[in-house]
Amino acid sequence: LWHKGSGSIIKRVAKGLKYYTTGGIGVVDVRDVTKAMCDLMESEVVNQRFILVSNNVSYKQFLTDLSEQLSTAPPTKPIAKWKLVVFSKMDWFFSKLFGTKRKLLRTHVESLYSFDHYDGSKITHSLPFKYIPYPETIRRVTQLFKKEND
C-alpha cells in the first residue's frame, strides 16, 4: 500500500522532503470514486464519462499538507527541472548498466512540472453527489499511514 503510487509519496514525505516541483495534481478520495461508481450504476445515467477530482492543488501545497499531518518539515525549495532531467538520464544509464528497473522516466519529470486543472463538477450536476473535502482526505490517509507505520 505504501510502496507504490500515491502511497509511496506519503511514505517519502514521512521521511522528510526538502524539495518540491512546480507542477500540480488533481486529488480525489478513493471513497468518492467508489461512491460515484455505485451511484452511477444505480442511476439512469448511461454512456457518459466523468472526471472525478475534488481539488486541483500544487505539489508544494500537497506536500506541505501531508507534512503538516505527518508532523514533518514541509519542503521549502523548488528543484529545477533540468536537475530531474539529469537524474532521469542517469537512471536510464544505470538501468542499462545494471539491468535494474527505471525509477524516474522523462515522462514522470514532465508531469511533475505540469499543472493541468481538471473540472470534476459534472457528476455533481448529474447526481446528488458531494466530494469528501480535500483536508479530510489528507487527514484520513495520513492517520492510516501513521497507524500502520508506528
Image (tube, rainbow, N blue to C red):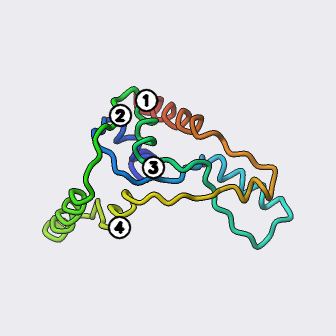
Q: Nearer the viewer, residue 46 or 122?
A: 122
Up the image or down, 104 lies above or below 59; here it is: below
> Residue at image x 38%, y 48%?
3
Position in image of residue 102 (x %, y %): 27, 64
Query: Label 3, on which residue?
Result: 6
Can you tell which mark lies on residue 110? none
Query: On the picture, is 17 further left or further right than 135?
Result: left
Callouts 2 and 1 close, C-beta under 8 Å: yes
Q: Determine whether the residue tagged by mark 1 lies in a helix, strand or loop.
A: helix
User: What's the CA distance linking mark 1 and mark 3?
Assistant: 17 Å
Position in image of residue 112 (x %, y %): 37, 57
Q: Nearer the viewer, residue 107 or 2?
A: 107
Callouts 4 and 2 close, C-beta under 8 Å: no
Decide: few, some or many residues near mark 2? Use Cα within 10 Å; few <14, some 14-19, many ≥20. many
Position in image of residue 48 (x %, y %): 74, 70
Report the amino acid beneath label 4: Thr
Query: On the picture, is 16 further left or further right than 131?
Result: left
Query: Label 1, on which residue?
Result: 68
Eye-nearest disc, 3 or 2: 2
Report the amino acid beneath label 1: Glu
> Residue at image x 63%, y 39%?
133
- Mark closer to the chain start, 4 or 1: 1
Position in image of residue 80 (x %, y %): 25, 53
